[in-house]
Image (cartoon, grey):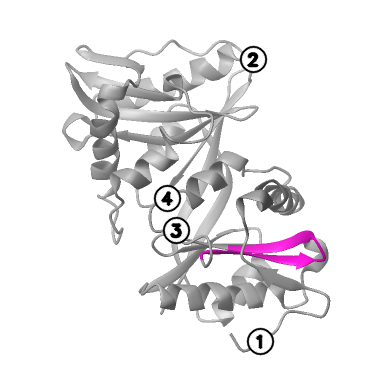
Amino acid sequence: MDDALPAGLSARALTIDDIDATIAMINTCELHDSGEWMWERSDLLADVRTEGFDPELDWIGVFRGDEVVAWGLYTHPRRAWVDVRPDHRGRGVGTWLRHWAESRGRDRGSDRVTQVIEDTLLDVAAMLEAAGYAPGYTSWVLRLDHATEPPHPAPPKGITLRPICSDDEAATMAMFEAAFSEFDDRLPSSEAVWRAGTVEREGFTPEDLIVALHGDTVIGGALLLDSEEIWVDKLAVAATHRHRGIARALLQTAFARSFDRGYDHTVLSTDSRTGALSLYERVGMRVTRSFTNWRMDL
């Protein structure tokens, strides 16, 4: 990269020892921009432990002395994450990190680089558009409030819901991959990538991943993360078993889990590629945040 960071700032590859400080910086940005935070230590650990991630090249921190003030992350295969602490914006740090991400994408042989930007950040969207990025699919965060006990899970006849066990793991990862591979223009993910974000995630317990079974066959699943609220992180049903109420039953399991743990709401995200927004709205969820996937061909 030809451009330089502003005076007083330096950059280097992040390390595992930097994770807590980096997450704190990211959530400072989230709180400033939206009033709530979305990242946890376990999220970042899952990303950097996936196969193909190069810890020397695929993430970078910008520092003022020993203090993390910005970062970039390039995750397989096309996705970049960039955050700059509010008091360091407008100095060219975001542009420097954008160039870093584009350079990293080219070095990895990617055909494009993408960033997901909250739709309220009009200045960031304008910067990306001026740099040659185009808007792609839309993502939403949805929330269901449940001050009183929600309905109990009601799976259809012949379908069982229970926590995952070790014998289910390979089939569950394959089910998720098959379901998500239906998205347009999505590159495949290996079983190792799925495992890193689910059963090998820091703090994971079997109760976090509810599977739906038809007999002994895994035909659906939902990953439920507890972070002072229940977040439905992944939800999928095999194409052969859709439109039978299985996804609704998995959602009801999440709502019941949330209520039983003393939370008055449940949260999830989806995007326009899935066609699932209407399902979530039918069970009473409402959109609270929206994002655009900005992309540039390399």
Label 1 or label 4, whichever lies nearer to me, is 4
How many marks the image carries: the answer is: 4
Which of pointers 1 and 4 lies earlier in the amino acid sequence?
1
User: In the image shown, does 80 or 265 lie closer to the viewer?
Assistant: 80
Q: Are marks 3 and 4 in contact (CB under 8 Å)?
A: yes
- Does the magenta-highlighted stretch encompass residue 67? yes
CA distance separating discs 4 and 2: 33 Å
Residue 39 in percent (x, y) is at 62, 44
In this rendering, the answer to whether 25 lies above or below 227 is: below
**Quick one: label 3, few (<14), some, or many (20+) residues within 10 Å?**
some
In the rendered structure, find residue 169 and report the number of the disc placed on it: none
Q: Secondary structure at mark 3?
A: loop
Q: CA distance from mark 2 to mark 3?
A: 37 Å
**In terms of secondary structure, where does tag 1 sit?**
loop
Nearest to the observer: residue 248 or residue 172: 172
Highlighted magenta segment, given as a residue range: 58-72
Real-space Cα separation, disc 1 to disc 2, in angstroms:
50 Å
Residue with the mark numbered 1:
3
Looking at the rendered structure, the kind of residue marked 2 is Gly
Residue 156 vertical placement versus 86 (above, below): above
N-terminal of the pair, mark 3 or mark 1, is: 1
At horizontal 40% and vertical 32% (from top left) the residue drawn is 199
Can you give x and y, in whole percent of width and height, for residue 196 in the image?
42, 42
Give me the disc on residue 262: 2
Q: Residues within 10 Å of mark 2 (few under 14, many from 20)?
A: few
Which tag, 1 or 2, sits closer to the chain's start? 1
